[in-house]
């Protein structure tokens, strides 16, 4: 009958792996050295930590996905476009390699088992456990937001849109999914989301096909719901006779004048407020 070995459940615990009773001191030292070398093989050479989302690059090394992508995007592995497309320098060997990365779920499993079994200990193990706990908390938050959005909560739907746009809560950035959640938020009555969806349709952003009619429908919905930017876009459409709207300076002025009273103050970019004010000032000058 085999005796069970104690397992380390958490890096902060003193219950780390211990050799079996029949092992000699030399055996224990060899096993510890083997575990340390094994742990070093899994460490990302950029972060010097156990990767939480490990990938294997063409140089055969294991990296944290975000770390190597940022390393390449930041120019550390590039040379002003001198390399062929989809290639960059290896952070370890400095050789030119493909930027294709292969997800290494087995490596992640091995790291987790090594930590839980007490074979991998110390600060790197503690940092990995902290990331796991944070990821679990993020997953609970995403599940809660989705539940609330399904119940008709517009703010939760918009929070999911932002999360997918920014890569929050351990989510992969996804413009298509972000726009889908923004559209759900708009349909639930979220003013800012409605205007943003309208602008996305006007410009054909991401996966959306350019559609001025649908874009202005969402923009006007945002304006009615209280979006300052929505009011500006409707005013601009009437001022310039754009996006399917007839030119009508009086209606342009009506919508521009609504801007200061809107609760959602989202017209700060592209000098929208300044342009609306200049138009209204010009009307007053003509009238005087």
Image: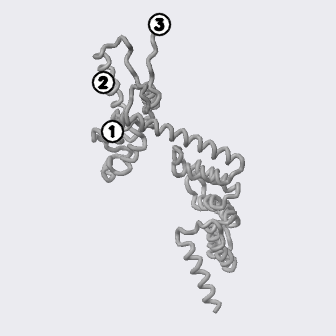
Q: Which residue is mark 2?
A: 33
Residue 169 image position (x, y, % from top left): 53, 45
Identify the mark at residue 1; answer none if there is no mark: 3
Mark earlier in primary sequence (2, 3): 3
Residue 214 placement, left or right of 100:
right
Secondary structure under tag 3 reads loop
Residue 258 in the image: x percent, y percent? 67, 74
Mark 1 to mark 3 CA distance (whole Å): 42 Å
Q: Nearer the viewer, mark 1 or mark 3?
A: 3
58 lies left or right of 250? left
Q: Which comes sooner in the sequence, label 2 or label 1?
A: 2
Nearest-to-viewer mark from 2 and 1: 2
Residue at 62% x, 53% y is 158
Q: Quadrant of the C terminus?
A: bottom right
The x, y position of residue 115, in whole percent, is: 43, 29
Displayed quadrant of residue 24: top left
Q: Nearer the viewer, residue 87 or 163?
A: 163
User: What's the distance in space between the residues labelled 2 and 3, CA to CA?
Assistant: 27 Å
Q: Could you classify mark 2 by the number of other residues whose Cα lies within 10 Å: few (under 14), some (14-19), or many (20 or more)? A: few
Q: Is residue 286 above or below residue 138?
A: below
Mark 3 neighbour density, 10 Å: few (under 14) some (14–19) many (20 or more):
few
Of the two numbered discs 1 and 3 on the same chain, state the one appearing first in sequence: 3
Q: Which residue is disc 1 drawn over?
A: 45
Which of 207/222 is in front? 222
């Amino acid at each position: 009958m085999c005796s069970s070995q104690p397992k380390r459940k958490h890096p902060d615990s003193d219950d780390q792996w211990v050799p079996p009773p029949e092992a000699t001191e030399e055996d224990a030292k060899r096993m510890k050295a083997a575990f340390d070398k094994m742990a070093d093989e899994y460490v990302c050479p950029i972060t010097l930590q156990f990767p939480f989302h490990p990938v294997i690059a063409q140089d055969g090394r294991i990296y944290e996905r975000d770390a190597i992508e940022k390393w390449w995007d930041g120019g550390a592995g590039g040379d002003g476009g001198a390399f062929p497309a989809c290639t960059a320098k290896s952070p370890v060997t400095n050789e030119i390699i493909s930027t294709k990365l292969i997800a290494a779920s087995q490596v992640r499993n091995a790291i987790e088992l090594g930590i839980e079994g007490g074979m991998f200990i110390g600060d790197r193990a503690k940092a990995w456990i902290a990331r796991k706990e944070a990821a679990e908390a993020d997953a609970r938050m995403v599940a809660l937001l989705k539940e609330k959005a399904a119940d008709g909560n517009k703010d939760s739907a918009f929070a999911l849109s932002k999360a997918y746009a920014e890569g929050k809560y351990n989510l992969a950035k996804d413009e298509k999914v972000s726009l889908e959640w923004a559209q759900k938020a708009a349909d639930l009555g979220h003013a800012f989301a409605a205007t943003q969806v309208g602008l996305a349709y006007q410009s054909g952003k991401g996966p959306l096909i350019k559609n001025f009619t649908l874009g202005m429908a969402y923009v006007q919905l945002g304006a009615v719901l209280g979006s300052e930017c929505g009011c500006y876009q409707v005013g601009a459409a009437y001022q310039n006779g754009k996006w399917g709207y007839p030119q009508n300076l009086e209606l342009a002025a009506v919508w521009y004048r609504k801007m200061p009273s809107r609760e959602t103050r989202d017209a700060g970019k592209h000098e929208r407020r300044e342009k609306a004010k200049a138009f209204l000032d010009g009307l007053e000058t003509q009238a005087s």
